Image (cartoon, grey):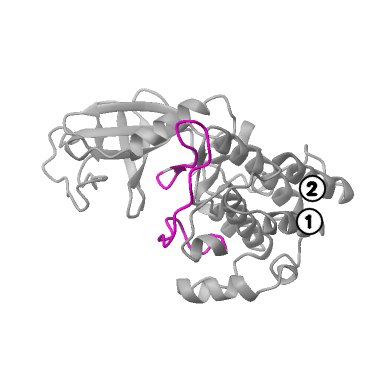
Amino acid sequence: MEKDKCIACSSDLVKTFPWIVPRLEGVKTVNGEWKIQNKVKTNDYVTVFKVTAINSSLTGYMKAEYTEHKSNVLEMEVYILNQLERHTNFCTLQAYDTSEDIRYIVTGPVGKSLREVMHQLPGKHFTNGTILRIGIQCVDAIAALHYIGYVHRNITPENLIIDVDMANAQIVRIWHFVTARRHVDENGEIRKPRSKLRCRGDYNYASVAVQEGRDSGRVDDLWSLMYTLSEFYNGKLPWRGHCSAHVLRWKQFISMQRLFRNAPYEIGFIIAHLSDLKYQDEPNYDWIIGMFETAMQRCNISHEKQFDWQQLNCSHK
């Protein structure tokens, strides 16, 4: 039987984007510690692989870059995860190492993204009880990220994942910080906003301001979350499949009543709050969470109720 190729000896590494991540073509093991299962995603910043630990059952996501083309992407993600290691709504940094010409990180444990889970549900959308609790967890996590001085800039259903362990399947985790940016300077002051910028994340979930080329502030992460929650209520966003310019027009003219027609009215109060905020303003995270909690109480939804995916038993990939 042919031995597994390892990252140090493979000649099949394809340097498509030399400043970011190799494809790891033909590579099966990394550093004798991680076995590559499959490629999860590739974008302008990074290629992500699903891996399992050779000496344990741990499953995680691996991101890698060539040491000769060092960027700050992996270092930034390591810093963020270390700062937030005690927060349950973020992945744990399992490894940050170098193997010959490759630098890599592994985060985990990981289960399915909420987009994958939603598509497995009978109605292809989440229920109100699940969505409100997703909102609470995500606002709390986003607030923690902002507190350490970073904005995510790409909150989407793909970047929200459930825990691989069914015993902890009520935890939603935010991951994938390749688009994150520090929004405060060395003195802790809000950085001056830039202009005429390209949208760094998925434009389907970007705020109107970001799509118009303005800089991402804390409020823009929450706009992305609200568009994500709208998709969870309706199964998809009405502008899905359109180009960026058409999506922007949709967002500028669509009514929030239509976008959240299946949501409790407290969501409208949250939208109104976000609409009043500018780049430099700090959202009232506690009040937003309180609105989600109020909606839960009015709709008689318990925090102990099972999430939709727990009934599917689908958190393992």
Foreground residue among 268 and 86: 268
- Quadrant location of the N terminus in the rendered image: top left
Which mark, by number, is residue 269? 1
Identify the amino acid type marked 1. Answer: Phe
What residue is at 33 percent from the left and 47 percent from the top? 46
Secondary element type, mark 2: helix
Which region of the structure is painted magenta?
A: 178-207
Foreground residue among 222 and 315: 222
Q: How crowded is mark 1: few (under 14 residues within 10 Å), some or many (20 or more)?
A: few
Q: Main secondary structure of the magenta part?
A: loop
- Examine the rendered structure and indicate whether residue 259 appears above or below residue 55: below
What residue is at 62 percent from the left and 32 percent from the top? 168
Foreground residue among 59 and 205: 205
Q: Reading the chain from its start, which is encountered first: label 1 or label 2? A: 1
State yes or no: discs 1 and 2 in contact (Cβ < 8 Å).
Answer: yes
Identify the amino acid type marked 2. Answer: Met
The spot of residue 6 in percent (x, y) is 19, 33
- Examine the rendered structure and indicate whether residue 231 appears above or below residue 53: below
The spot of residue 122 in percent (x, y) is 65, 61
Which residue position is annotated with label 2? 291
